[in-house]
Each structure stands twice: as structure tokens, then as C-alpha cells.
Image (cartoon, rainbow, N blue to C red):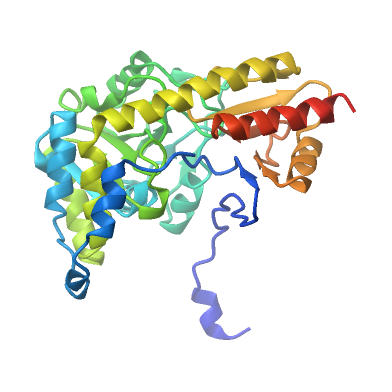
Amino acid sequence: MNNWQDYVRRVIPYTPGDQPNKPNMIKLNTNENPYPPAPGVAKVIKNMDAGKLRLYPDPKIKGLIEELANAYGLDNDQIFVGVGSDDVLSLIFLTFFNSDKPILFPDITYSFYPVWADVYGVSYERPKLDDNFMIVKEDYYKENGGIILANPNAPTSIYESLDIIEDILIHNRDSIVVIDEAYIDFGGESAVKLINKYDNLLVVQTFSKSRSMAGMRIGYVMANKKLIKYIDDVKHSINSYTLNYASILAGIESVKDKEYFENSNKKIINTRKKTEKFLTEYGFTFPKSSANFIFAKHEKFKAVDIFGALKASDIYVRYFNHDRIDNYLRITIGTDEEMEELRFFLKKYLNR
């Protein structure tokens, strides 16, 4: 082996869901929104001044931050915007998780957390969720180098009440606590209301799910001004020009159209209820979902077999071959028509 290979940083990378591209497929595996973004997004992209693409984008992302600040009742310097919430979370790991104590996150959660920890050399522990996939808050009372919790959690879809979140904050005044709210707009109350009460709280959200803009890569974190300044300093030490010109314009238009945003989310929630109904009728069980997906298992049929049969028919859901959840399928909520196709397939498959 050549000597240089001794110094390569080697990690097990995050594995995203399949991204097939087939005609007439039904893609319910990556929690994308089935509806287009707000109409103003397409309009502003179409009318965009292409000549400005020769210039660097605004490094302060001022216009988008102002719209978000107005929407959440925060000051501009309480918000940081990055290239998707994954970029924001990665910067948070790099900025704040530098203690010799382990950070804490659940054994079943977003599988990027251990990847970032490994990349940045951060030690971690993974307290087990209980048998109902709920957080045991007492597991987070011990000394730690930071805490990160997805709420609603992925892939379980479970929302923990703000009482639980605040209890964990109270018991961790000396640690940074990150609440990853990628799915908060589909159920539950955001921890944003706690930001001005707890100076160690960071709340991360994204445009990828509820705003139908996964392809534009916009994520953001809200916190007190000091924490945002720390993240901004690290970001500008790596790459000042991150979010591109088109994404900034599109993000502004998305935040402006509150009515479209709310109506789109209501459609997904209503479709989720219909899907829960037929899944129950067909013998599936699942936790109460507060996300744009359902985490379901069947008592008689193995998840891996159902997954394979669906894939063979160009219906894609997510299967995790991991301890404790290897008999579950994560099913993204699509349009009513897509979920009806899923229902029709499952009816035939389960009664074959």
C-alpha cells in the first residue's frame, strides 16, 4: 500500500434513497413533495436576469433571510441559510460539536448524523428509543457534548411534544441542542418559539419537503444571534458564496406565498389520512404520522418482500435493512392518484 493511503479519511457514507427515472413510475421513497412549488417560483426563474449569473450571488443572502425573518417573527441575524438542511447540519456539527464528550442522538433516526460525526471525528452515543419508537427523555440527562434530535423523527414519522423538547433543554443548559424539523409543517408545533428562551437551541428547517423545492437546495437554521454568528464565521471560512442566485430568488417567492404553502400541506395531510385508512384495512400497523410519510409494517408479510414486489412494478418505497426496523417500509405520501395505485397494488398482492 502506498504511504499516502494511510492518511485518507475513510468513512461509511450516507446512502440516499434510489433515484430511478422511469416513465409512469410511482416514486414514494425519498419524501419529496408531489406538488410543484408556489407559482411565483416558476415565474421568477423564467424571468430571471441570466446576465447576473456571471456575478457571485449575495454572500449574505439578505433578501431570503429578510423574508424568513418576517415569516417567523425573528431578527435577520437570527437566521442562517445554507445549501439544503444537510449543508446547514454539517456546518453545525463542524461549529459546535468539538467537545471531548460524546454527542447524543437516538439509535433510530436520520442516518446522516453518524456520518457527519465520523467525518468530523466527533464521538457519539445513541440512546435507544422505547418500544413505541419514542424518546426516553431521561437518557438525555447525562453529560454530553451536544444533542441532535429530528422532530418529527425520520424514518419513524413520530413527533415529540414541545414539553419533551423543553425538558431536554432544561437538563442540558451547558450543551448545544439541535432540533431538526425537516417535516414539522406536516404536523406538530415548531420549537422556534423556544429560541428566545434558550440560548443553546438551534432549530433547522428546509425547503425540500413542505415547500416542494428539493431540487433548489435551501435549508436554514434559526437561533440566537451569537450562535448564528458562529455558524456564519465558519461558513465564510470555507466558502462565502454558497446559495446560488436562482435559489435565492426562488426561495423568496416561496416564502411570500403563505396561502399556497398552507394549502399544499393540507392536501398532503388529507391524503395521508386516506392512506392510513386503507393501510389499516389491509393489515398494516404504524405509528401516528406527523410527517409526509408513513412508517408501516405488516404482521403477515415481510417488508423486504413487499418492497421487492413494489419495485418490480415500478412503485418505489424505502426499505431499511437495520436492526429494529427491518420489517418496516417508509411510504412517502404522493398525490391521491399515486396512493390509489399503491392501494390497488397492495390489495392484489396481499390477497394473491
From the viewer's perspective, is 108 left or right of 266? right
User: Residue drawn at (24%, 27%), measured in percent from left and top?
Assistant: 192
User: Residue drawn at (18%, 30%), measured in percent from left and top?
Assistant: 72
* Whole-percent x, y for residue 345 in the image: 76, 32
Any part of residue 289 in sight: no
From the viewer's perspective, is 21 left or right of 169? right
Nearer the observer, 187 or 338: 338
From the viewer's perspective, is 98 left or right of 124? left
Which residue is at the far right? 352
Q: Quadrant of the N terminus?
A: bottom right
* Whole-percent x, y for residue 112 in the image: 49, 47
From the viewer's perspective, is 237 left or right of 122? left
Q: How many marks?
A: 0
User: Residue drawn at (75%, 18%), measured in percent from left and top?
Assistant: 282
- Residue 162 vs 109, above or below: the answer is above
Nearer the observer, 289 or 78: 289
- Residue 345 vs 7, above or below: the answer is above
- Residue 1 vs 49, above or below: the answer is below
Any part of residue 60 in sight: yes
* Whole-percent x, y for residue 64 in the image: 18, 47
Q: Quadrant of residue 346?
A: top right
* Whole-percent x, y for residue 305 in the image: 81, 38
Nearer the observer, 47 or 1: 47
Q: Quadrant of the C terminus?
A: top right
